[in-house]
Image (cartoon, grey):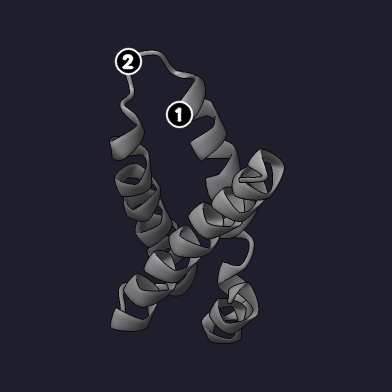
Amino acid sequence: MEEMIMDFIVEKALVLVPVLWVIGYYLKKTPRVYDWVIPWVLTAVGIAGAIGLMGVTVDAILQGVLVSGAAVLGHQLIKQAKKGD
């Protein structure tokens, strides 16, 4: 599944995935930030970051959504694998 997402993300935007992962980690540790807010914040930051890298285009917005999705999916894959249900 993750490989399929990576087929659609341009190389220029890949740098945002670990950046979003770190931001998500710190948001999770912040006491007043609800868990349901974190994916929304990461999506907004991902879109802003992609626009910063690629300019204001529809493709940049899509790349921002994709990199935030890859960051959240990657985190959840590791979290669920460790949980082992």
- Specify few, some or many for label 2: CA neighbours under 10 Å numbering under 14, 14-19, or 20 or more: few
- Please say if the residues under marks 2 and 1 sit with CB atoms less than 8 Å apart: no
Question: Label 1 sits on what residue type?
Answer: Leu
Q: Position of residue 17 (x, y in %)?
A: 58, 57
Quick one: SS at disc 2? Answer: loop
Compared with residue 31, is residue 62 higher up or lower down, i.e. above or below? below
Residue on which disc 1 sits: 27
Q: Which residue is mark 2?
A: 32
Q: Quadrant of residue 3?
A: bottom right
For the point 58% across and 76% down, the residue is: 1
Using the numbered discs, state the Cα–Cα distance from disc 2 to disc 1 in whole angstroms. Answer: 9 Å
Q: Quadrant of residue 14?
A: bottom right
In percent of the image, x 36 and y 56: which residue is there? 48
| Residue 63 position within the rendered picture, expressed as x and y whole percent measured from the top left | 43, 73
- Mark 2 belongs to which amino acid? Arg
Considering only order in the chain, which callout, 1 or 2, is on the residue closer to the N terminus?
A: 1
**Quadrant for the C terminus in the image:** top right
Q: Residue 50's x, y, as percent?
A: 44, 65
